Image (cartoon, rainbow, N blue to C red):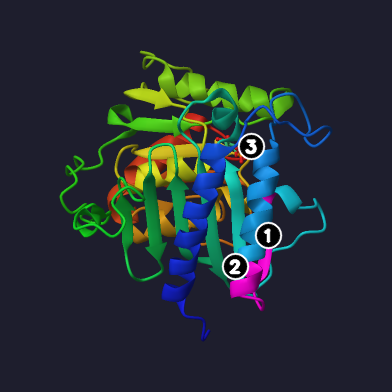
Amino acid sequence: SDIDLQGVHDTLIAVAFEAGRMILAADPNNIPKGTKKNSVDLVTEADQAVEKMVNTRLREAYPACAFVGEETYVAGETKVTDAPTFIVDPIDGTTNFVHGFPHACISLGFAIGRRPAVGVVYNPFLDTLYTAIKGQGAYMERNAVLNKGTANSNKLKLPLAGRGDVQEAPALRGLGTSLVGIEWGADRDGANYDLKVGVFQRLAAAKAEAAAASSPPNAMVHSLRSLGSAALNLCAVAAGQLDCYWEGGCYAWDVCAGWCILSEAGGFVASGNPGDWDPELDSRVYLAVRGAPSGARELVEEFWSVIGDKGIL
Ligand code: IPD
């Protein structure tokens, strides 16, 4: 493709900062009527306004590129094709936004041939920016807006592979020494809910002495974290803050940007069509792991044996 990925990356950062200003200024109590499937699947007017702004800016800058956004997605109609496509979640972590829990972001992905090529994730509450261009590494920048144009700005841009001057994460060991990201999602009944909660239990519970051969083993991980943003979970794995993150139920806009950042940071996604990504074939089940696949094989195997069933959703 003859698209200048650096140009896309720079445009997405400018758009992310504009979105950040809108999100910080927005009233999270403006909830439009009749938009989502149940009482916990939240959307605010800010989600819609930010998506509209992002769509407008990207259409101006890249009129030939396609656009898929969470708030304008139509089930069964919207498709991610092979065309260069912006894949956007205007506010990932809407529940946090509504409650004032400062862990929400704008997630701006760019895919070519259905593969993530650029990722920009920006949390305006903590002013933290995560970025990646395929083949060029991933970066985290703290105080991203605060330090723009100052001498600090380069210093704070930390490469996530090799982690620069970020504290080195210990080598990835088994699941039993892991901090694991999980999410509750908006599906709170039925078989998928039972499966999901069963997984949380098996991950957390003390290892049974003699588990029945037929039932999956327990893992007793260091702990579980449910931070409320799929994109920021992927970035946390990229930054080595979480060892892995598992969710059944993500959509393209939740993961496109974070996928690029995670893989450029040397981590990988072990599911969600393993190793590669085609949103059309997506199982929507994501296990994101820090470190290279070679060093993480054991952890991934252990994870699948503990959860017993990959087939959620
Ligand atoms: C949601 C968040 C949440 C995850 C859901 C997502 P939204 O995105 O990322 O953590 O559990 O699967 O849909 O609705 O806040 O954009």
With respect to residue 27, does 90 lie above or below? Answer: below
**Residue sitting at x 35%, y 53%:** 267
Within 10 angstroms of label 3, few (less than 14), some, or many (20 or more) residues?
some
Drawn side of residue 108 relative to residue 209, left or right: right
| Near-viewer residue (190 or 67) | 67
Q: Is residue 189 visible?
A: yes
The disc labelled 2 sits on which kind of residue?
Arg
Q: Earlier in the sequence, mark 3 or mark 1?
A: 1
With respect to residue 115, does 26 lie above or below? Answer: above
- Give the CA distance from mark 3 to mark 1: 24 Å
The disc labelled 3 sits on which kind of residue?
Ile
**Residue sitting at x 52%, y 59%:** 15
- Give the CA distance from mark 1 to mark 2: 12 Å
For residue 94, which quarter of the picture?
A: top right
With respect to residue 267, does 44 lie above or below? Answer: above
Residue 1 image position (x, y, % from top left) = 53, 84
Label ID, residue 312: 3
